[in-house]
Amino acid sequence: MQSTRPTLIGARVPRIEDDRLLTGRGRYIADVVRPGMVEAAFVRSELPHAEVRAVDTSAALGSPGVHAAFSGADLPIGPLPDLVEWVRPVRQSLLAHERVRYVGCPLAVVVADDRYLAEDAAELVEVDLEPLPTVATADAALAADAPLLYPQWGDNLLLSMAPENPAVDAAFERFRTISGTYTTQRHAAAPLETRGVVAEHDGDRLTVWISTQAAHLVRTMLAGVLGLAERDVRVITPDVGGGFGQKNQMYPEDYLVPWLAMRLRRPVRWIEDRHEHLLTSCHARDTRIELSAAVREDGTIAALRGRVRTDLGSGEAFPGGFGPSLVAVGSLCGPYRIPHQCVAVEGVVTNKTPLGGYRGYGMPEGTFAIERLVDKIGRELGIDPLDLRRRMILDPDDLPYETAAGARLDSGSHRAAFERAVEIGERMLAEERERAEPGAHLGVGYATYIEGVAASAFSVTGIRSGQDSADLRFDPDGGVTVAVGISAMGQGAHTAVATLVAEALALPIDQVRVVMGDTDTAPFGLGSYASRSAVVAGGAIAQAAEVLRRKGTEIAAHLLEAAPEDLELADGGFQVRGSPGSAVPWAQIARVALTRTFELPPGTAPGLDARASYEPPGIDHGPRPDGKMNAAANYTNSTHAAVVEVDPGTGVVRVRRYAAVHDCGRVINPLTVAGQIHGGVAQGIGGALHEQLPYEDGQPLATTFADYALPTAGEIPDITTEELCSPAPEIPFGIKGAGEAGIIGPPAAIASAVEHALGVTGVDTTPLTPSAVRRLIEEARS
């Protein structure tokens, strides 16, 4: 049913959650305080690889204020389940009692009246570790004589996939080969809020407050590991100070704190400090992609082949850190007509913190590799790299199009976004040259890509598919409460959900109340990751709203003594088509449905509520017989342009201007999308230029923000964003996701810009720190 009211979708609606957060009324994990609560502190390994000979907690137990202390040998909980059958099992322990495989691995936990007393007592725990040889890098892990992290495997490969494709082999026999190796360093999400857990058991039910992106899945995992029925576990997500995929993981502390609350029969809290966070919260990226192209005479790519090798750290993570490698493979073809690919994947375990998810989830790595390779092909063949892209980029007439990896692109503005970004980039470069000092080294670079949104995670988790749910319930005054299974973590989810409900029911947005992040009040959902929230919540809202519209139409027609087919949605209710004076508001319909039920049409049941679950069509939850896989509901597209200035004397790279031309289908709220792009670009700049987690013989060298260099406001330039609109034809409201797009382009665009500024080649590794840039300059001079 169409509405006569102007649409809210695309309006610059202020975020409804911001007033509460900006005035200090947000409630985060550290704000959760329960009567009688005690606090936990963990004892962690200082060695990267060792056999656990003994952990003695007796001295800690005698320390003032201590209520309990446990080692791995004290826990009645077995190893965590390995849910993905096609990779090797790691049988992770909550507290290591046989072997530690990275610095920071938890060995014991101490519970005391407060965190200070717990930390003091933790220092009294005596740990006897027998050092083992350290496996420092992925290459070292694959050596024939490498020490084994999991001796039962026989090697250090968590997974190894070596597909075959005769069409690729034929292309490489026929055409010229151009190759490159592209490395993305280990770094992390570093959200403003670290992890934390509070748990309380009242004798009947376990309630857990946790900073997570997926409350229902935390409940599922907790129930399974702790031996509880899911109905006896309640998980509450307060405000989340940033997730970025790092809080889409399950960690040992997430299970241990609830177990402690059950064991001690009192509330227990643990808040991660920043040192712990950089040591133990999942790291990301750390990937090397060896990529070759079979190149026709005109420079276009006939086939790709290569290998994605990822250093997974110890591999003790759920979901496993191998997932981004598979996504990187799926994103290599980007928005280009590349008919064939065959790319192997190796997930290697080493003595480092486990790898996990981080915003972009493999797409920045894959985009960096293909965009750098396209630039190299252009140079070697004497073709302008921008013209080379024009020869390969998808046109509207190409759609729908299936990539060589199996992604089905049914909509997009690939060429239009590219051309507009180039136009903006060239203008920005000219403007910067006009104001720059003589001799300044300025350059512009571009990156174009697609982003799969609302992806299935079943193949990498064994429990996450693609659905989500929504409950819509009218109150007697005409207000609506909507409960959804997605989660908020600062991305404007409350505003997006309220907008879609208000749009579907022609209500003012302030009459919509949004509930999420509580397994007792929200319907089952898979949470927020993979830019899925708007797509899956929007689909469920559309279906539930249709049920309410049909029932509302029936009641309104009865009250107006009109035929249902003569009614239309108006602002706040229904009216007879062409007769605005004959109208009935939702408030009156709700009163009749809920309190004045004797006025309902004959045979109509009381109540005005609906629940719906929605799974986007066309998603593959595993590879098809041909090995291809369409893992995402839809695909956004974007092209980024970066203008940089490089100081050849110091090697310092400054991003002077940045632009992103982006297409996420129908935009719900331009303010929110611009914020997502700006935040993602800032993180991408950090990954391209600054952030890294180096190791030396298994010892982490960046364990505080004094060593882990995050970009500040001074390093982030003005960012221009423009939105194109290619509505998703099969998704309600025509929307696509926008959560990860900003972070995908910066590494490739900035690397290209640095090459342009300096007139060098081989900028194939991030981060582009001053020392790395000086080496490039020296190599070019030699």
Image (cartoon, grey):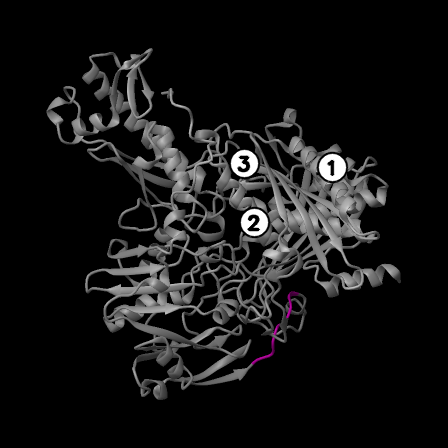
The residue nearer to you, when weighing 267 against 56, is 267
Q: How many numbered callouts?
A: 3
Q: Amino acid at mark 1?
A: Arg
Residue at 31% over, 66% down: 258
Rendered image quadrant of residue 40:
bottom left
Contact flag, marks 1 and 3 (Cβ < 8 Å): no
| Residue 407 visible in the picture | no
Would you name the residue on which mark 1 appears? 389
Q: Residue furthest right?
A: 782
Report the Cα–Cα distance between label 1 and label 3.
21 Å
Tag 3, which secondary structure?
Answer: loop
Residue at 50% over, 27% down: 729
Which of the two discs, 3 and 2, sits closer to the camera?
Answer: 2
Contact flag, marks 3 and 2 (Cβ < 8 Å): no
Tag 1, which secondary structure?
Answer: helix
Q: Which x, y percent locates residue 350?
A: 59, 68
Which of the two discs, 2 and 1, sits closer to the camera?
Answer: 2
Residue at 85% over, 42% down: 381
Q: Amino acid at mark 2?
A: Gly
The residue nearer to you, when weighing 166 against 682, is 682
Q: Which mark is residue 664?
A: 3
Q: Amino acid at mark 3?
A: Cys
304 left or right of 451 in image? right
Range of the magenta residues? 132-138
548 left or right of 373 in image? left
| Vertical position of residue 264 compared to residue 403: above or below | below
Would you name the residue on which mark 2 appears? 680
